[in-house]
Amino acid sequence: MKTNYIFITGGVVSSLGKGIAAASLGAILEARNLDVTIIKLDPYINVDPGTISPIQHGEVFVTEDGSETDLDLGHYERFITTKMTKKNNFTTGSIYSEVLEKERRGDYLGETIQIIPHITNAIKNRIIEGSKNKKIAIIEIGGTVGDIESLPFLEAIRQMAVDLRRKNVMYIHLTLLPYISVSKEIKTKPTQHSVKQLLSIGIQPDVLICRSEKKISKKEKEKIALFCNIIKKAVISLQDTDSIYKIPIFLNKQGLDDYICNYFKLKVPKANLSIWKKVVFLESNTNKKIKIGMIGKYIELPDAYKSIIEALRHAGIKTKISVNIKLIDSEKIDNKKTKIFKKLDGILIPGGFGNRGINGKLLAIKYARENNLPYFGICLGMHLALIEFIRNVIGIKEADSTEFNKNCKFPIIHKMRNEEKNIEMNSMNFGGTMRLGGQLCILKKNSLVYEIYKKKQIVERYRHRYQINKKLLKEIENNDLLLSGKSKKNKSIEIFELKNHSWFIACQFHPEFNSNPKNGHPLFIDFVKKSFSLNKKNNFKI
């Protein structure tokens, strides 16, 4: 199958939403019965984002095959049906690692290793490999045109138009049109300069997607088209919106998918966007409301919890409940400030690493348990829920995790072990050494999670280095504590719940990675429904 390539670059400023634009474009083309994949090229030197702080780069999205990837891959999976893999995201660091490994092995004997052609060839090979058997491959280039880190990627995609013939390659440039409120006008000059920078590299954009606070007028489109050397209908306005799920409809209304299909000479039906229109309708027509408190330590950058925030929104779409998410800094919670929880309808503690903010999270869990408030613990949220239960219900105050206290007397959470050899699975490296990706989990009948999933076996995605110490758990059996999910061959405990509670579920995996606006996720949907059913306040004030 011949693949057509669409390269999306960004200009003027970063964080314009290239990932969402790429995902939305993929959704429209998929709605025209085209087989689509999306690849993200990240210019940083890290081999993958697994060791980067979420405050710097947002969440790490985990694929089914166990790759730690950029958060944009989460957008891709929420908008298109193609599942992302390790081939859908690579960095400058991974490219250089590959080339240097080959050089050390002797693959380039006699050659001087250079950015052109060795690095650019490696980039092109990865793009082609990740796009195999797809009619359309959308390639998002991270960063902004003009960044020194992006130059090898831009050179590689310039070369691809020569290698594959220009008619099989399209360049889309996403830029910012700033709105000057004093003069009440949109300024096009930054976009002109950005396109000029692209041209200096040898890339002429075929389409401009212009981000702006206000809708772009016909006159402004004509000016941009003239100065940037493209036709007017290829200038697409993308104004600010209250929902990212409206963007496929916005792009379709301006004929972007028609333009692309005509460019590649693809004879396909018109886009059927009924599912996206339904999502937008349901999202804007909720008739109930709840407030969920998410307790974390990265709240200054909500992108650190992007998939969870979206999963809660998806659950709201499916249940017609408006979910107001209150991000609460766990480091600012103490015994005097637990009254903040009284105005919540549910508490969620997401995954994380390290001991910063742990005490605040434990106080939140204790409040949820004692006040019958729905509680959802994910990964670290599971570990802390078990520690809190053992300390305050069982009475073993020494219960802790070796992640927080290496020499604790009752390590109910410890580093993953090789069960056959009964030893800790240690590694000198942090990157890519956790339990990652899709794993089978067996649910216990007569449990709440079994009722929610309505099946015995599920596959969810994991990202963890610590787990429940099964040997110590045998010492604290309690009628209230139900171990409702276990791994294949019963090697590890994946889910537990409290029986005499309205809704208290804690899981080792990350269900947010399998949620999308069309279907939601069973656990998030049930959590939102239960939080509403117990809601007697229905107010948004904290």
Image (spheres, rainbow, N blue to C red):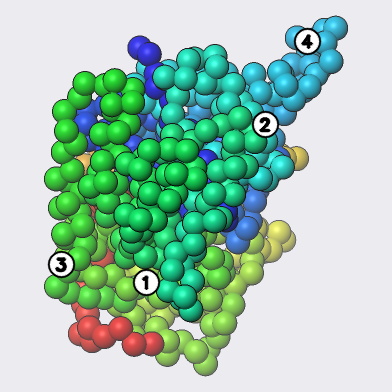
Residue 475 visible in the current orientation: no
Distance in Å between CA atoms under marks 1 and 3: 18 Å
Asked if labels 2 and 1 touch by Cβ distance under 8 angstroms, the answer is: no
Mark 3 Cα-neighbour bin, 10 Å: few <14, some 14–19, many ≥20: few
Asked if labels 3 and 1 touch by Cβ distance under 8 angstroms, the answer is: no
In this view of the protein, which residue sits in the foreground, 282 or 65? 282
Residue at figure coordinates x 14%, y 45% from the top left: 274
Provide the residue designation for mark 1.
Answer: 325
Asked if labels 3 and 4 touch by Cβ distance under 8 angstroms, the answer is: no
Closer to the chain start, of discs 4 and 1, is 4
Q: Secondary structure at mark 2?
A: helix
Residue at figure coordinates x 32%, y 65% from the top left: 242
Mark 2 belongs to which amino acid? Answer: Pro
Residue at figure coordinates x 21%, y 62% from the top left: 283
Closer to the chain start, of discs 1 and 3, is 3
Q: What numbered label is drawn on residue 152?
A: 2
The x, y position of residue 43, in whole percent, is 64, 40
Provide the residue designation for mark 3.
Answer: 285
